[in-house]
Amino acid sequence: MSLSPGLIAAVALIYMAILFAIAFYGDRRSTPMPPKVRAWVYSLSLAVYCTSWTFFGAVGQAAEQLWSFLPIYLGPIILLLSMPWVLQKMVMISKQENITSIADFIAARYGKSQSLAVVVALICLVGVLPYIALQLKGIVLGVNLLIGEHALDTGTSAQDTALIVSLALALFTILFGTRNLDVTEHHRGMVLAIAFESLVKLLAFLAVGAFVTFGLYNGFNDLLDQAHNTAELDAFWNEAVNWPALLVQTGMAMIAIVCLPRQFHVTVVENIEPKDLRLARWVFPAYLVLAALFVVPIALAGQMLLPAGITPDSFVISLPLAEAHPGLAVLAFIGGASAATGMVIVASVALSTMISNDMLLPWLLRRQSTERPFEAFRHWMLTARRVSIVLILLLAYVCYRLLGEGASLATIGQVSFAAIGQLAPAMFGALVWKQANRRGVFAGLIFGALLWFYTLVLPLAARGMGWSLASFPGLSTLLYAPIGLQVDPLTRGVVLSLAGNLLLFAWVSWFSRTRVSEHWQAGRFIGHDLGTKPSNRSLLAVQVEDLLLLASRFVGEERARQSFVRFAERQGKPFEANQPANSEWIAHTERLLAGVLGASSTRAVVKAAIEGREMQVEDVVRIVDEASEVLQFNRALLQGAIENITQGISVVDQNLRLVAWNHRYLELFDYPEGLIYVGRPIAEIIRFNAERGMLGGGDVEENVAKRLYWMRQGTAHSYERVFPNGRVIELIGNPMPGGGFVMSFTDITEFREAERALKEANESLERRVAERTRELSKLNQALTEAKAHAEAANQSKTRFLAAVSHDLMQPLNAARLFSAALAHQDEALPHEAQELVRHLDSALRSAEDLITDLLDISRLENGRIAPDRHPFALASLFDTLAAEFGVLAAEQGIDLRVRGSKQWVDSDSKLLRRILQNFLTNAFRYAKGRVVLGVRREGQHLRLEVWDRGAGIPEDKRKVIFEEFKRLDSHQTRAEKGLGLGLAIADGLCRVLDHRLEVRSWPGKGSVFSVSVPLARRPAARPKAAVGSEVNG
């Protein structure tokens, strides 16, 4: 089964687009990730260790020898769980020393040797290029399988695929790996994309493994049983475990997790917070366990189900294709591509950093431009890194072409591991052995690299070219001579190269002298605590006074002494020149001199001074050269700084001669051409300005003498002058340490004009504020009087309503009695009279209701309603309302439904009944069809609700309806009665009872009015008298 190349290309493009989007989001994110998320992203990014070797090649290894794949998983797990201090120490040291790569790390430990950094970078480049080629081979393998070509085909289409992948990865790496010049600035977007790829490749491998184990078989036991019963696999099961190879490869995997450039980069350089390693220590081993879970099932299933000619490295994709699951095959391809691309991206960034920093930067510093040094430097270095990335990937493509079909993924990976493993003695020696030195590292690296090439690379190349190993002296003996153990040639080559490296490293380090700078760095790298500094004992027989004398020669006696005194104060000790100089004093002297001489020249000067020897001529030449460059750089930096500020600047030396100025200074004073030059006495310039009237009135010579006096005395001064052209200039003078004077000239004309305008506006504003204050006082007084009149009128209204309502109720009650008496004479009255009596009674009832409302409003406003809250049964209240409004509902054709409750509530039963009456009356007035009185429970409250199907209330009218005498006449259907007081009374009673009143409405559908009443406990029943008690007598 095969898929369309166009489909594969589309999937690859979509996946790359997703990676670009994730990386872009990570870079442009304005806020840092939360600590927990950051720790998880960091932990997952460590899985860049899992490349196409672990995705495709591990299955191939397991298919050839069952447990041979385990070392690549066991090594990192053992290191992280048993020796976590290794990575923790690397991270802490790298942050302390501002380390940017593994070459920088090793060089920094061994005296900051530039030549050692170059050697390490070259070994990394040679060792990693085949490993990148392995990733290209893994991607091409997946593409060939999906489109139906031979898995190991390296023809034109495969070459095109590999070249396109190389260029695409180069573009991604350039965009998100070289955005900043400072490599220690973390590439958040790149790391986020790598973490995403780690998830993708793990999920893809688990999906294929689960499909094989539980889709093609009935679990692990079924698969293993069938594999044991397959005759073709008898030799596979009977093959003995190669324990020497297993142990050696496990050790190499432990070394790889520390020494691989890409692993060092994500683990150390990209680490934002050292405590993130606590989570990574457990997450990454768990990741590796999951990644190894289905390796054996896939390897066994591939051998049982696939034809014999299929390469084992392809089983992960070939099995889904053979079982007609193209989607799963594409997912497996994406997982393998993720494994490959993650490694290529990070390795390219790490290698390009080493090439630019350790190979190209020293050459660049000697050709540094003095006009715009930083911009030129930044542009050149970023370009160098980007070009390096392209060259690295093109070289990897050439390496891929040269490898051809001759080697498996696992073989290439092991050879690359062995190359990087040559850094292990230097790396672990840097962390644990103080006597390890640069000479030992050089000897070990060179000898180990030669053995690696002779015993591992040469046999691989000879096999590909068809050469005989006999033509290489001693090679056959080294690789195939019997030694009593079953050790394959690959394992022998690894052991021989590492053993030779380690032995020579230890021997040379032991018998050679360690340089002072290496002693210092050893103290910084090796300590009982990661944060400790070197021991306080004196490393050499040198006193603080000697260092002070040395520093004075280059930075001046006053500055040197001040710096030494401040350093002693920071240490919490008095400054004593005759005390022995420990490593801290030596390091302080280096820092003080580095700004003048440069770092490497400073080390040479200090070393020569404390060893008590004369410096060589070439050292002096180099120091002068570097110091000259530093001075030129500093001057260019100073000139660039003063030219880019808005003030005019002039600098005078201790002899009162002009030594520096900027263009703005010339513009402000409009000097004629040729007047200003370096070394001109400042007195002549001051006199020239005084004669032009720029220093105010008075005698010219007096003005000149006064300003010269200030400069000689080192007196800071400032003043303003109005120049003849009308410009206002602020002049500020400040003395410099060691003599000299700096003058700044600021044009503040616009500021003074704005200040004058502001002052005028302020005076005008004060007048307007005073006028407005008088007007507001009058208005406030009028408002106070109007409020008093309104309150008095309201009190009069309230008293009037109370009095009138009471007086009106008496005749109305009498009229109701007469009306009732007439109603009892129905049989004696004619039909027309009976109708009049009923209308009369209705009119009297309405009038009584209106007057009752007026009385309630009056009592509410006067605060004369005192609620009597007590527990009572809600059912009795609902029964009363149902009976009261049932007859009215029947008369008006309204379907009244009452849904009561057996709960007890805490309220005033009369006032609560009045509230619900007003709700129901309002509903009957506007309702169409059905009105519902019901109860809902809300926690410890009951919400008593009245629902109607009226016209509804608009949103902007829902507060108006609770005002007195307000009615929505436009929506009324029975609006002939009422003054609009019912809801106002209900609202007032709710406030008196401290009950919450709510209204919800849907225009055109209806409304619901509700009041929330607290629940109450039912009173305990009184015990009944005993029945049949005992009678005595």
Image (cartoon, grey):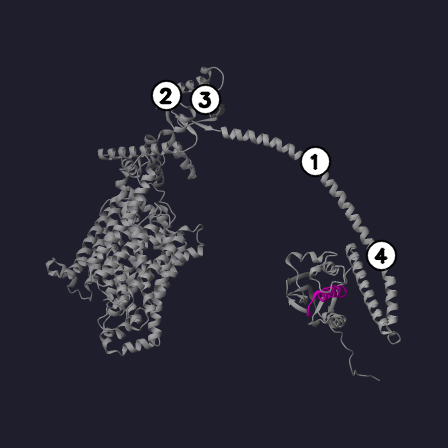
Asked whether disc 4 touches disc 1, contact meaning CB atoms under 8 Å apart, the reply is: no
> Mark 3 and mark 4: span between their CA atoms?
95 Å
In this view, the residue in front, 117 or 985, is 985
State the image quarter where residue 143 is shown: bottom left
First in residue order: circle 3 vs circle 1: 3
Q: Residues within 10 Å of mark 2 (few under 14, many from 20)?
A: few
From the top left corner, tell me how far across and down residue 280 is, in percent. 38, 58
In this view, the residue in front, 201 or 456, is 201
From the top left corner, tell me how far across and down residue 680 is, in percent. 36, 21
In this view, the residue in front, 903 or 38, is 903
Mark 1 = which residue?
Answer: 774
Q: Nearer the viewer, mark 2 or mark 1?
A: 1
Residue positioned 45% across, 50% down in the render? 31
Asked whether disc 4 touches disc 2, contact meaning CB atoms under 8 Å apart, the reply is: no
Instruction: Determine if the magenta segment contains residue 895.
Output: no
Q: How many marks?
A: 4
Region in magenta: 906-933
